[in-house]
Amino acid sequence: MKLPIPVSVSEIAEKIGAEIIGDPDRMVLGLNEIHKVEFGDMTFVDKEKYYDASLNSAATFVIMNKRYPCPEGKTLLICDEPFQAYNSLVKEQRPFVPLTVQISDTAVIHPSVILEPNVVIGHHVTIGANSIIQANTTIVGNTIIGENVNIHPNSVIGSDAFYYKRYETHHEKWHSGGRVVIEDNVEIGACCTINIGVSGDTFIGAGTKFDSQIHIGHGAVVGRNCLFAAQVGIGGKAIIEDGVCLYGQVGVAQNITIGEKAVVLAQSGVSKNLEKNKTYFGSPAQEIRDTYKQLALLRQLPEMAKAIKKLEEMQKNNKRQP
């Protein structure tokens, strides 16, 4: 997430009680998770095995829980609880503001947009020309919807990220400061849910079509002209490239990439990156020819077991003979 107004790193350090290593006069432009950071962004790290990844990232500012040599061009902030510090900054910049009316006064909605009964529109939502938001749908704050978008009944766009930091005794929620961005000519079926990013955007590309009961996790990026059939679930931060087709009940794990124009057949489970222009099936999903070969072998197992048993009996008989 980008800050509406840049803030000096020394001001942030004072707020979170951190020691500064590096230039104290730099301006912080945004707050982001490590996989989303850009120049001017601040991120955090609290596990030593991730220090190098954080310090070698594009982030300009890193909140850490240990003094460390500061790389050139970066500023480090040292404090006891980097996660708590980072989370407090996101809450400050994107506080929860309850919605007390059905359509927020801060929403920007083109006059040609059709809003059916019981639609709820949150703060700072933008909806482009000729879009249709059908009955009982909720568009949560900071969502951007393009032109000619059709969202079917009972969908929720912009719900919080399902993202928690684990402690031994509890799970603490990451405060969601991202957005959902939906480009032009997208269709979203009934009862779909799209989570916002923790700090970046969840993105749906132009021309993509969703069936009913689709779930898109936090920070996922869905390309242009994709087709998702019913009950597809996309894990957080997954990248689905242009023209991908996912059949019903396909599950996609977090942090993976499905290549352009790949096809994944129904009820498959995607647990690793998939190459473009290929068809996949199974759980874990494999290229369809490999899966069919394995299934053919499985069907032969009963006969193979019988043949093995016969061979074992013949060996036993041969041993008994003098």
Image: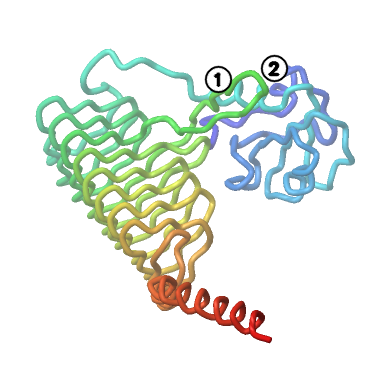
Q: Is residue 107 visible?
A: yes
Q: Is residue 226 above or below residue 196?
A: below
Find residue 112 and report its image quarter: top left
Q: Tell me if mark 1 has few (under 14), some (14-19) or many (20+) residues whose alpha carbon lies within 10 angstroms of its own.
A: few
- The residue lying at 38 percent from left, 44 percent from top is 216
Q: Is residue 294 left or right of residue 88?
A: left
The CA distance from mark 1 to mark 2 is 11 Å
Query: Residue flagged by tag 2: what amino acid is it?
Result: Lys
**Residue 224 position within the rendered picture, expressed as x and y whole percent measured from the top left:** 34, 61
Q: Is residue 139 above or below residue 261?
A: above
Marker disc for residue 15: 2
**Residue 40 position within the rendered picture, expressed as x and y whole percent measured from the top left:** 65, 42
Q: Are marks 1 and 2 in contact (CB under 8 Å)?
A: yes
Q: Is residue 320 left or right of residue 278?
A: right
**Residue 113 position within the rendered picture, expressed as x and y whole percent measured from the top left:** 14, 39
Closest to the observer, 127 or 32: 32
Q: Is residue 288 visible?
A: no
Q: Is residue 33 left or right of residue 309?
A: right
The residue that label 1 is drawn on is 92
Closest to the observer, 209 or 149: 209
Closest to the observer, 16 or 212: 212
For label 2, the SS is: helix
- The residue lying at 45 percent from left, 46 percent from top is 235
Query: Residue flagged by tag 1: what amino acid is it?
Result: Glu
Find residue 261 and report its image quarter: bottom left
- The residue lying at 47 percent from left, 38 percent from top is 197
